[in-house]
Amino acid sequence: MTSLGLAFIVLGTAFNLFGCLGLVRLPDVYNRLQAATKCVTLGTCSVLFGVLLASGLTATGVKCLLTIIFLMLTAPVAAHAISRGSRRGGLPLWPASTCDLYPMPAGGSEEPGLEGDEAGAGVGAETGANP
Amino acid sequence: MKGIVSWLLGTLVLLGLVAAAVAYPLQLPGYQDLPFADLFARILTLLVLGAVLCLVRVALGATAADRIVAIDILGILIVGLCAVMTLTTGRSWYLDIGIVWALQSFIGSLALAKRLEGRSFDD
């Protein structure tokens, strides 16, 4: 049982490493999200399942099971929210992309996308201004 | 031509980092007396290398969306690292750190994605 758990942990570590390599190497936000989210989510679930097999049905194993369920429910939701937000915020695709199923509205987006430096100041100002 | 050369250079650097992590693993405390201690050392070192690559993307990222993606991925990766640390040290509260990190990372990613879209938080 411990050897099977170790095999799952090694497999999940390989998935995590390849996902992080994709996060560094790919050219675009959407490509990076597509490469990293699936690999890292399934790799982490595999690592947790390996820890569950190696430790048995103790408190650690039950926590691993709960974390697997939580990650499977929340990680795709977060990734989809980030890609939807960046698309609606007007972030363009990589210029060599060949297929765009959700083209930009004519005349640009109605609200400009955030740049990196304005994000912190805008957050503080708006949350202070709203009652 | 220049693009191909820089691509090959980056690939060589990344392969060298992975090979160095496999050849010279970190000596983290807590697992030296386990069976499969060498394997656990390499697993922990590779997970830490993945976290460092996520932080590289945070430092280099051209837009805010890149940084948000990298932080989200880092939060998922740390959960696996905490699970392996639970197995190696035998302390069950490392997994509690992982659960809380996953929860906070999810809520933070949703809030930042909403902000990226151009809406405010209570919209």
Image (cartoon, coloured by chain):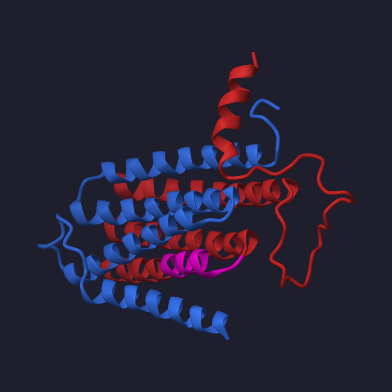
Chain colours: A red, B blue
Residue A67 x/y as whole percent:
43, 47
Segment colored magenta: A15-27
Of residues A131 and A126, the one nearer the viewer is A126
Of residues B26 and B2, the one nearer the viewer is B2
Prevailing SS of the magenta stretch: helix
**Which image quadrant: the N terminus of chain B?**
bottom right
Residue at image position (33%, 70%) is: A4
Residue B120 x/y as whole percent:
67, 30
Q: Which residue appears farthest toward the bottom when viewing the image? A: B1
> Taking B95 as reference, is A24 above or below it?
below
**Which image quadrant: the C terminus of chain B?**
top right
Q: Is residue B3 magenta?
A: no
Q: Is residue A60 left or right of residue A115?
A: left
Of residues A99 and A7, the one nearer the viewer is A99
Residue at image position (27%, 75%) is: B20
> Taking A111 as reference, is A18 above or below it?
below
Question: Which image quarter: residue B37?
Answer: bottom left
> Taking B85 as reference, is B111 above or below it?
above
Of residues A44 and A113, the one nearer the viewer is A113
Residue at image position (45%, 44%) is: B102
Asked if one can make out residue A1 in the rendered structure from this viewpoint, the answer is no
Residue B65 x/y as whole percent:
59, 50
Q: Which residue appears farthest toward the front when viewing the image? A: B2
Q: Which residue appears farthest toward the top when viewing the image? A: A131
Q: Is residue A16 magenta?
A: yes
How many marks are shown on the rendered structure? 0
Residue A78 x/y as whole percent:
59, 47
Asked if one can make out residue B54 in the rendered structure from this viewpoint, the answer is yes
Q: Which residue appears farthest toward the right when viewing the image? A: A106
Question: Which image quarter: residue A96?
Answer: bottom right
Residue at image position (37%, 55%) is: B80
Q: Is residue A32 left or right of residue A57?
A: right
